[in-house]
């Protein structure tokens, strides 16, 4: 199954994102369950959140991945929504 993580950054937390980016990318690479990922952007092109698509066995696995994300551990996100997602196109 696939799960979509929709994460919105706290305002004025760009430095938190920058400081934890390398660890976040390592978490993505080492987990082996991330199908695609990337930041949401504001009108000026600044990073303001994340979309992560996971291939998991359960929603509990998706929740555990999200909780272990260095961005989450650093307190970057204002909100995190995890939804089962079905790929139709692409």
Image: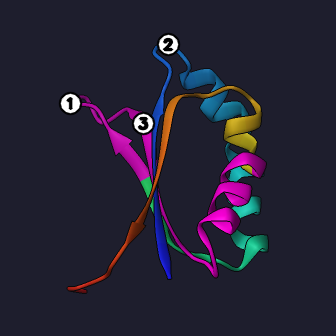
The answer to if 42 sits in the magenta stretch is yes
Q: Which residues are magenta?
A: 39-68
Q: Secondary structure at mark 1?
A: loop
- Residue 48 in percent (x, y) is at 41, 32
Crowd band around label 1 with a 10 angstrom C-alpha radius: few (<14), some (14–19), many (20+): few
- Residue 31 in percent (x, y) is at 75, 72
Distance between mark 1 and mark 3 Cα atoms: 10 Å
- Which residue has dot 2 on it? 12
**What label does residue 43 carry, if any?**
1
**What label does residue 15 carry, if any?**
none
Tell whether label 3 touches label 1 (CB within 8 Å): no
* Sequence-wise first label, 2 or 1: 2
- Which residue has dot 3 on it? 47
- Residue 54 in percent (x, y) is at 55, 71
Residue at 30%, 36% (x, y): give it.
Answer: 45
- Residue 70 in percent (x, y) is at 75, 43
Q: Secondary structure at mark 3?
A: strand
Distance between mark 2 and mark 3 Cα atoms: 11 Å
As drawn, 67 above or below 17: below
Q: Secondary structure at mark 2?
A: loop
Tell whether label 1 touches label 2 (CB within 8 Å): no
As drawn, 71 above or below 65: above
* Sequence-wise first label, 2 or 3: 2
Foreground of the two, 44 or 59: 59
Name which quarter of the figure residue 29 lies in. Answer: bottom right
Crowd band around label 2 with a 10 angstrom C-alpha radius: few (<14), some (14–19), many (20+): few
């Amino acid at each position: 199954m696939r799960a979509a993580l929709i994460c919105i950054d706290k305002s004025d937390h760009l430095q938190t994102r920058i400081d934890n980016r390398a660890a976040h990318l390592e978490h993505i690479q080492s987990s082996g369950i991330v199908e695609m990922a990337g930041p949401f952007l504001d009108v000026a092109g600044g990073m303001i959140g994340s979309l992560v698509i996971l291939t998991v066995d359960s929603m509990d696995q998706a929740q555990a991945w999200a909780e272990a994300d260095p961005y989450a551990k650093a307190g970057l996100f204002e909100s995190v929504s995890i939804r089962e997602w079905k790929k139709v196109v692409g």
